[in-house]
Image (cartoon, rainbow, N blue to C red):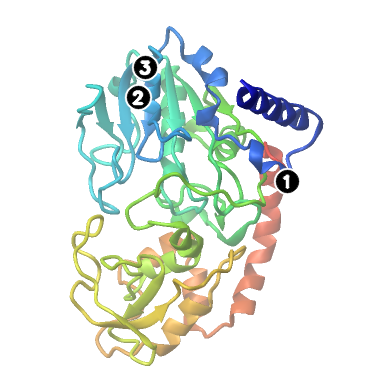
Amino acid sequence: MILGAKIRDLVLICLIFLAITPITAQNTDCFLAAADRPQLYLPLLKNKNVGIVTNQTGLLKDRTHLVDFLVKNEIKMKSIFAPEHGFRGTADAGEHVKSGMDAKTGIKIVSLYGNNKKPTAEQMKGLDVILFDIQDVGVRFYTYISTLTYVMEAGAENNVEVIVLDRPNPHDGYTDGPVLKDKFTSFVGMHKVPVVYGLTMGEYGNMVNGEKWLKNGVQAKYTVIPMQGYNKTKRYGMLEKPSPNLPNEKSVNLYPSLCFFEGTQVSVGRGTALPFQIYGSPWTKNLPYQFTPRPTEGAKDPFLNGKLCYGENLSDNSEDLRRINLEWLLKAYREYKSPQQDFFLKNLFFDKLAGTDELRKQIIAGKTESQIRASWQKDLLDFEKIRVKYLIYED
């Protein structure tokens, strides 16, 4: 009884503190992801036909999956929409995700990374609400914001409400990188935003809706269930890895800087125990670290499979990066020596990742990191004028 009273007193103190104090770094003991605030979203789902876009990261703090929690609370779950990597989060990057049935609940699984990336009118038929709950990483070329965009567009076109359960952005509180140019629009970059855009998933959807970036300028009926006690400059641990090759917070921290290598002849460690924590290739032999990619779960046929690579191991880098580090990319380009193959892949996927061809041209021209970064600043300032309009949490 005494322990219960102490818990009630602590909860009361948290509630009072949140009521009278803006969100700050000091009140993290009271932090709750939106999924852990069912009193805010269950009433919006009651007596509705509900679809959900989620994956292995859709967890409550006790690690109950949101789908199981909703079923237990008698919400009428009609379909699970699976994004890139699938509902269970085990598919390779770029691998088609199959539709099917969830063995545990019997709910139909609809792939949004197979024949279609946008829900069709038939797939939306009979739904009143789509709930969206995915742990994002806050980087433009990570495709879950593209999936959210297509879900919002389908919701607007089919009169289905979209509700986002918000989660922390591990790269929140800053913006960096080149802003996407229109001609480089793709599924790894749909909007004129920088590589790191400093918004939670809920805030990003607000921006897409508010700026009328959906097809034909349509706007979705859109609701964000906010987090409690969240501060954009703090870093919060993740309950589950967001995708197979981002296994921990170190790889997530390095991801905005290292993912550019995916458009080059350099491996980022897919098929090793350190994906997105190392980089290297057979043609950068002056670099000190050695590794050989082999097939693993989430990297069934990794880039440079079976080839000895020379590079750097960044897994001991404990710095919380608040900017993109171009040093590694520029170093690899300088050290790259291959008579047969250019550093950049022939399909110029690098330009899609960068959202522009300027970065590739700057690297080839021998521009320094400071010169490259200076070229981003005007576009970043212009984007900031848009970004601030959609902030839910203190920056």
Above or below, comparing residue 330 to residue 351 in the picture: below
Circle 3 Cα neighbour tier, 10 Å, few/some/many (<14 / 14–19 / ≥20): few
Query: Which residue position holds label 1?
Result: 26
Query: Which residue position holds label 3?
Result: 72
Query: Which residue position holds label 2?
Result: 68
| Secondary structure state at the residue bearing disc 2 | helix
Left or right: 130 as drawn, with respect to 211: left
| Type of the residue with mark 1 | Gln
Marks 3 and 1, the one that precedes in the sequence: 1
Closest to the observer, 348 or 149: 149
| Secondary structure state at the residue bearing disc 3 | helix
Circle 2 Cα neighbour tier, 10 Å, few/some/many (<14 / 14–19 / ≥20): some
| Type of the residue with mark 3 | Lys
**At x 62% / y 27%, what residue is drawn?**
3
Left or right: 177 as drawn, with respect to 148: right
The label number, if any, that marks residue 54 in the structure image:
none
